[in-house]
């Protein structure tokens, strides 16, 4: 994907959602003297450093300056100031007069921040549904051969091109509300202000729904590649087997070539001013690999099968037993080429007053203001980067196994031989999982009545600012809580026809898989429980294999080489379409 489009979209978000602190100096250049009295320092002349660790070099030497590049390292702005960049020179009530509604509805703020924050950006916070490698039909071992011991190693590649964000959609618009009409209306109202229009690209004005809609079809891909290892032992009429995958897992967001072309042809993204400066393609690519892709490598869960031959006739055999899924998943490395994300991140802090204090509202020397503006820009960039990381943490940071849940359930196998060459195999299994505590993300519940505050009451100004700070964080950063989770039960059905000659074998079959909706334990009433659980899902697949069977060591050891594959025939709901290809080597002795 051309990651420059994501870069420009980041700048677009900053432009439309944080217009006030970024371009506020233009507004103040047009205020008269009486209006400016709101923003003068206190009479005693004292100023408090509220930089919170922000520093800036006040010299005129800007060599090596990457302040205009959001992909530069964080150390680029670590400098020691000779005076405070952030001073207490603007009151809470003055800030609210610019970003909050007045009691007089005819007086409009530059941008109505409370009206924006009433809306939910996240429509849901559930992880996406994916099938365990242990349940893929083309990765199943040969269980009912005649030899005593059997070992197999199967190389495989599995790809889901469009994972489902919700029960019925593979597009991010069902997860993130990019086309919320109330938000669009408020932004367009802000852009109708002539002073704001001077600071916003003309290509954006009147085109907000179109620009946001270009990203509503972002999709999620998953790739898994590795080895499925299998071991089987027969004890008379009993069959014991185990399988475990060792593999590489990668999740990423993506757009198709056609969707990228539509973005590239949009006037806003053809505007060079909307792209970052001082950024080469390699740096941009590396940046987005760290924020839009997550990967890890290690072992998955282990599947153990214990089956008994309960019925045997010349043409028919029946096995009944148990399947167990043991939580052995562990990763040896993560962030191989992508980013690493903490599944229980702390909530960041946001300070509206700190942003405004970095603007020209606080008198300082021109060189100092240039550095303050650079810090302001990098602060806003970092905010949106962290917001993007939170989305990636929720969706891309998936474990190798089933989050350490144990699975167990009955399994029935029936094999019927039509003649010496053709046989049919039917498998039916159910699996249930234990409940376990794991980290999940939840939206903080919003009450529209909480936003009906008196933003002109100076006595309430400080609490109103703190309220807006908290709502900004709650809007862009769902909270992580350790919650009791019980995955939905599984139903698995497979039917195949197999042809065997002296050395050649071929199989063709159909697989059906259904996962119930997961259940969660009690959560606080301040959190939104709906839309936070994995939805129910079902999928049908066609699978097959073709291979050669031989023998060695005077026919004391049998071996086989199989090519396998599968493809989704239908996905009724909740899970994306995927395919798997593989090559297996087995030894029976």
Image: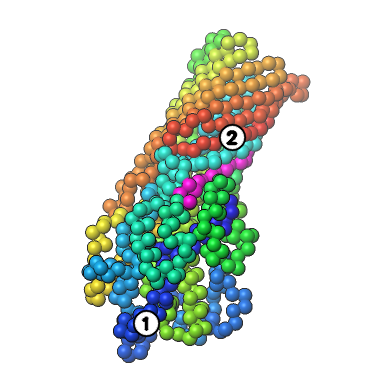
x, y percent for residue 171: 46, 45
x, y percent for residue 563: 66, 29
Q: Earlier in the sequence, mark 2 or mark 1?
A: 1
Question: Which residue is found at the position 57% from the left and 83% from the top?
Answer: 60
Residue found farthest to the bottom: 44
Question: Which residue is found at the position 60% from the left and 57% from the top?
Answer: 285
Up the image or down, 563 lies above or below 167; here it is above
Q: Distance between the residues labelled 2 and 1?
A: 62 Å
Q: Name the residue under label 2.
A: 580
SS type, badge 1: loop
Q: Give the magenta-colored segment's residue range.
A: 214-230
SS type, badge 2: strand
Residue 89: assigned label: 1
Which tag is nearer the camera, tag 2 or tag 1?
A: 1
Question: Which residue is found at the position 33% from the left and 72% from the top?
Answer: 98
Q: How crowded is mark 2: few (under 14 residues within 10 Å), some or many (20 or more)?
A: many
Drawn side of residue 523 relative to residue 228, left or right: left
Marks 2,1: beta carbons within 8 A: no
In reply to whether residue 226 is colored magenta, the answer given is yes
């Amino acid at each position: 994907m051309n990651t420059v489009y994501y870069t420009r979209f980041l700048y677009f978000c900053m432009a439309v959602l944080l217009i006030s602190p970024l371009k506020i100096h233009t507004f103040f250049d047009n205020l008269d003297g009486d209006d400016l009295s709101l923003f003068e320092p206190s009479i005693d002349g004292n100023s408090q450093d509220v930089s919170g660790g922000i520093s800036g070099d006040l010299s005129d030497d800007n060599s090596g300056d990457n302040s205009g590049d959001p992909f530069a390292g964080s150390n680029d702005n670590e400098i020691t100031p000779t005076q405070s960049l952030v001073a207490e020179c603007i009151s809470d009530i003055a800030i609210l007069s610019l970003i909050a509604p007045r009691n007089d509805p005819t007086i409009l703020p530059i941008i109505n921040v409370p009206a924006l924050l009433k809306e939910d950006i996240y429509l849901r916070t559930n992880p996406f549904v994916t099938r365990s490698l242990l349940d893929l039909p083309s990765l199943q071992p040969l269980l009912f051969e005649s030899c005593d011991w059997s070992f197999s190693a199967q190389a495989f590649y599995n790809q889901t091109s469009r994972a489902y964000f919700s029960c019925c959609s593979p597009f991010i618009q069902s997860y993130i509300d990019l086309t919320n009409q109330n938000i669009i209306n408020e932004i367009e109202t802000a852009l109708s202000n002539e002073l704001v229009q001077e600071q916003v690209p003309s290509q954006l004005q009147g085109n907000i729904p179109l620009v946001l809609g270009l990203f509503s079809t972002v999709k999620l891909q998953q790739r898994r590649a590795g080895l499925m290892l299998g071991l089987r032992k027969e004890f008379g009429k009993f069959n014991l087997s185990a399988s475990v995958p060792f593999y590489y897992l990668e999740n990423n967001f993506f757009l198709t070539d056609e969707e990228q072309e539509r973005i590239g042809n949009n006037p806003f993204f053809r505007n060079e001013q909307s792209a970052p400066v001082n950024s080469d393609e390699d740096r941009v690519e590396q940046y987005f690999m760290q924020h839009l892709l997550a990967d890890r490598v290690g072992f998955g869960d282990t599947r153990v099968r214990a089956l008994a031959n309960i019925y045997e006739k010349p043409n028919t055999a029946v096995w009944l037993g148990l399947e167990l899924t043991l939580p052995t998943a562990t990763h040896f490395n993560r962030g191989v080429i992508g980013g690493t994300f903490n599944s229980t991140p702390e909530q960041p802090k946001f300070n509206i007053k700190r942003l405004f204090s970095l603007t020209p509202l606080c008198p300082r020397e021109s060189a100092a203001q240039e550095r303050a503006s650079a810090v302001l820009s990098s602060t806003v960039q970092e905010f949106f980067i962290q917001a993007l990381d939170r989305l990636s943490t929720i969706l891309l940071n998936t474990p190798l196994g089933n989050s350490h849940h144990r699975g167990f359930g009955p399994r029935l196998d029936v094999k019927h031989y039509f003649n010496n060459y053709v046989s049919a195999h039917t498998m039916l299994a159910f699996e249930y999982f234990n409940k376990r505590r794991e980290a999940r993300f939840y939206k903080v519940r919003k009450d529209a009545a909480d936003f009906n505050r008196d933003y002109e009451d100076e006595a309430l100004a400080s609490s109103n600012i703190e309220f807006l700070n908290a709502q900004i964080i709650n809007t862009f950063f769902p909270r992580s809580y350790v919650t009791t989770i019980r995955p939905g039960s599984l139903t698995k059905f497979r039917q195949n026809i197999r042809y065997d000659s002296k050395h050649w074998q071929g199989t063709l079959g159909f697989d059906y898989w259904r996962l119930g909706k997961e259940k969660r334990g009690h959560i606080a009433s301040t959190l939104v429980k709906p839309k936070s659980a994995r939805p129910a899902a079902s999928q049908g697949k066609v699978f097959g294999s073709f291979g050669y069977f031989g023998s060695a060591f005077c026919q004391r050891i049998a071996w086989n080489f199989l090519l396998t594959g599968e493809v989704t025939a239908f996905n009724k709901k909740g899970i994306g379409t995927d395919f798997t290809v593989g090559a297996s080597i087995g030894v029976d002795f």
